[in-house]
Amino acid sequence: MKPELDDDKCMRCGACVGSCPVNAIFLKEFTLDINDDCTECGMCVKICPIHALDIGGDQNGRR
Amino acid sequence: MDVDEGDVLKYDVVVIGGGPAGSVAARFAAKGGADVLVLEKRQEIGSPIRCAEGVSLSWLEELELEDIDSSTSRVMKGAILYSPAGHELKITEKLAGDEVGVVLERDHFDKDMARLAVKEGADYMVKTSAVGLIKEDGIVKGVEAKNFGKRFEVRAELVIGADGYESQVGRWAGIYESLKPKDVMTCFQYRLTGIDMDPDYTHFYMGSDAPGGYVWVFPKNEDTANVGLGIQFSRLNGSKTPKDYLDEFIESHEDYKDGEPVDMVAGAVAVSHPPEKVTAPGILLVGDASRIVDPMTGGGIVNGLKQGKIAGEFAVEALNEGRFDEEIMQRYEERWRDKLADKLWRNYMAKETAMQLDDETFDKIIDALSEIDLETVTIGAILEGVKKKYPELVEEFEDMI
């Protein structure tokens, strides 16, 4: 399952975009898209400065 | 500028990203006679600000500027470093080699850098994203772009990727290197108003308030400052976010805890060593996209400005020679590395060490330095100073003195 974005929290800062190892996340002016290249590695979930992304479970050290 | 679906625009140089590095590259390319177009994804250049805004003014002359527009900055007298136990070290302008520090108004500053590029003849489009590279026989020949939902092409001899930390251009060109978690800082900042501080100094708090990083307080006026922190990505564990760390810091500081936020900024900064390659035939990267952020401070503006000029001047030269092959792109690589790479590597190694220091060590270092009369702030002078009081701390860095 791809990470889920909490739109109310997301600040469109791009931290997850630059950190995604497979370039699956795209920052548009007012939205963030995650495409099917996502490998569910959890990097974006962990790097988000405000925890606006969640991938479920506890496999990435953060919920 | 207005475009229609399917339009094909022709330029010598197209710059992706209207930040400081992109605009300086555009300015110097245009100055040398190149036709330049800058594409900015956002609707406003310089906004939203994703920056702590503290920089040195070491680049004015180099950028052929007499002074910085006063609406874009506030001049500082120096910096104060705080250890976890509260020891203070004041670093004045004189100590820092007369290097003036300023706190920028990035939203004004970025627009001013764009203004200077336009003055030389560069064109700009805002709310316009690059969506892919145009390649012919493996050589980059321009970008596909989108403006108000309309797709169009910009054909150019050279594409300059100035698209920041989250650079797409570098990835499309196949010159992207994955970042190691230890080489990424994840950051959070408030602009707090109604706080108490010395507004003529930038303030830095070292130690476990911000693991692997530091807390900064950069004054915007008498009672308002950018208060933020960066934390080493690999040290983030459990559910505590950079925002949580910052909230804790603010709550525990009398001077700041009654402040109210008027802005909030999140982001990530790469504090890696310089990458192997920031060019391919027909394309080069500048600024954060090329990972020239100083690994020690996390600051990228100054290096981006200096590198932007090199890129713009290189573009003119290559245009005049009529080629953008692998070989000529090496010229840009060599020039920016000559200028920046030594210090980036040195500070990368220093960062690797500094990130390991515990609170007690920070206390000792700042305590020792606050007692002596530092004449210059160099790594050597700092180590010498610490050695006088805590020789055991300096043993492993002896070769750096």
Image: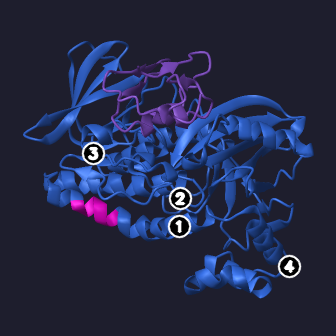
Chain colours: A purple, B blue
Is label 1 on the same chain as label 2? Answer: yes
User: Which residue ends up furthest to the left in the rendered image?
Assistant: B137
Helix, strand, or loop for circle 2?
Answer: loop
- Mark before the other along the chain sequence, 2 or 3: 3
Q: Which residue is mark 4?
A: B371
- Mark before the other along the chain sequence, 4 or 2: 2
Question: Is the N terminus of chain B in the top left, top right, bottom left or bottom right quadrant?
Answer: top left
Q: Which residue is mark 1?
A: B347
Instruction: For mark 1, name the chain.
Output: B
Name the amino acid, label 1: Asn
Is label 3 on the same chain as label 1? Answer: yes
Q: What separation in Å lies between label 1 and label 2 (alpha carbons)?
A: 6 Å
Q: Is residue B36 visible?
A: no
Q: What separation in Å lies between label 4 and label 3 (alpha carbons)?
A: 55 Å
Name the amino acid, label 4: Glu
Hey, which quadrant is residue B386 in on the image? bottom right
| Near-viewer residue (B294 or B248) | B248
Is the residue under label 2 in contact with that under label 4 (CB below 8 Å)?
no
**Range drawn in magenta:** B330-335
Q: Is residue B85 above or below residue B246?
A: below
Question: Is the C terminus of chain B in the top left, top right, bottom left or bottom right quadrant?
Answer: bottom right
| Mark 4 or 3, closer to the camera | 4
Q: Which residue is mark 2?
A: B295
Residue B186, given in percent of the width and then of the height, sits at: 58, 42
Q: Is residue B261 above or below residue B177?
A: above
Q: Residue at coordinates 56% horizontally, 69% vertically from top-left?
A: B350
Q: Which residue is mark 3?
A: B34
Is label 4 on the same chain as label 2? Answer: yes
- Mark before the other along the chain sequence, 1 or 2: 2
Question: Any magenta on residue B122?
Answer: no
| Near-viewer residue (B275 or B389) | B389
Q: Residue at coordinates 24% horizontally, 12% vertically from top-left?
A: B5
